[in-house]
Amino acid sequence: MKTICVLISGSGTNLQALIDACANGTIPDTRIGLVVSNRSAAYGLERARIAGIATFTQTLKSHKDAGKTRADFDADLASSIRAEFAKNTNNAALDLIVLAGFMHILSPVFLAAFETTPIINLHPALPGQFDGANAIGRAYEAFQAGVVSETGVMVHRVIAEVDRGDVVLVERVPILASDTLESLEQRIHEVEHGIIVRGALAILTL
Ligand SMILES: Nc1nc2c(c(=O)[nH]1)N[C@@H](CN(C=O)c1ccc(C(=O)N[C@@H](CCC(=O)O)C(=O)O)cc1)CN2
Ligand SMILES: NCC(=O)N[C@@H]1O[C@H](COP(=O)([O-])[O-])[C@@H](O)[C@H]1O
């Protein structure tokens, strides 16, 4: 049995895709041992609770209010993940960390704490294009400006440089002249829900 940890910040539709894939065997012999959010209002936390998955929340605001730095946040996040994961999985091995819409840039402090655990991220852009937040909106604007003719979604390994880790999987997504930002977002989200499952499976079966 493989055991994974999923980090989220929002609605958790990609988390739900992973929950469903583990439940229906698309990702065989695998369970999600812990869901972690940096936002207490993330609906993905409710999705986890409905699925009977342990959750943990740590917000940057709470650390800043306590006079702590981003480095403190990342160090505390790493140690909390290890402790909460062990507590909720009976000390299972942590086989994979998946960033599923996790909107916090992880520092080398965090990455060093998990140097033997693969960490992957879902990013709604093609490699080398639109790194960072709001990638879909920037791709849409670039299309309107005639700079790009398509966009995509990738799953990549997480390194210190944001969205520049080795690509695990990538899928191109067309942008249509008739597209609104909302229709493009919908098309991209549908691709995300598949590629995040295939990306996790690719790493778990190495
Ligand atoms: N070290 C890494 N950390 C993260 C990566 C990565 O590749 N390396 N991927 C991101 C996910 N992501 C894009 O895929 C991303 C998310 C958020 C941001 C960002 O600018 N975050 C701001 C806060 C934004 C907010 O709270 O709304 C910040 O961290 O200050 C950039 C890229 C996850 N982390
Ligand atoms: N840089 C990463 C990034 O921008 N991720 C974005 O966060 C959303 C999370 O949705 P979800 O909470 O419904 O899974 C995803 O749709 C993805 O586009």
Image (cartoon, rainbow, N blue to C red):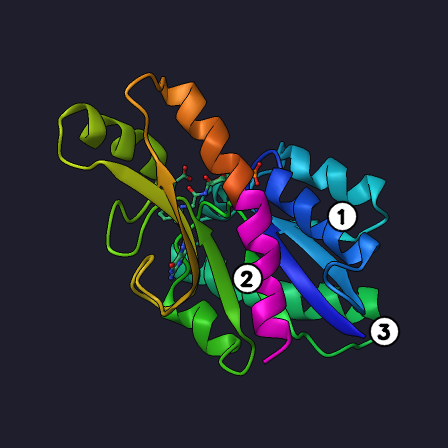
Q: Which numbered circle lies on residue 90? A: 3
Label 1: few (<14), some or many (≥20) within 10 Å?
A: some
Looking at the rendered structure, the kind of residue marked 1 is Asp
The answer to which of 192 and 150 lies nearer the viewer is 150
Q: Which numbered circle lies on residue 199? A: 2
Cα distance between the residues tagged 1 and 3: 22 Å
Q: Select label 1 or label 3 by which is in front.
A: 1
Q: Is residue 199 magenta?
A: yes
Q: Secondary structure at mark 2?
A: helix
Q: Which residues are magenta?
A: 192-206
Q: Residue at x 54, y 83 (%)?
A: 116
Looking at the rendered structure, the kind of residue marked 2 is Gly
Cα distance between the residues tagged 2 and 1: 15 Å
Tag 1 and tag 3, C-beta contact below 8 Å: no
Dominant secondary structure, magenta = helix
Which mark sits nearer the N-terminus, 1 or 3? 1
- For disc 1, the marked residue is 20
Q: Residue at x 70, y 40 (%)?
A: 45
Mark 1 CB near ligand 2 (8 Å cut): no
Height in image: 168 above or below 143? below
Which mark sits nearer the N-terminus, 2 or 1? 1
Q: Is residue 80 left or right of residue 20?
A: left
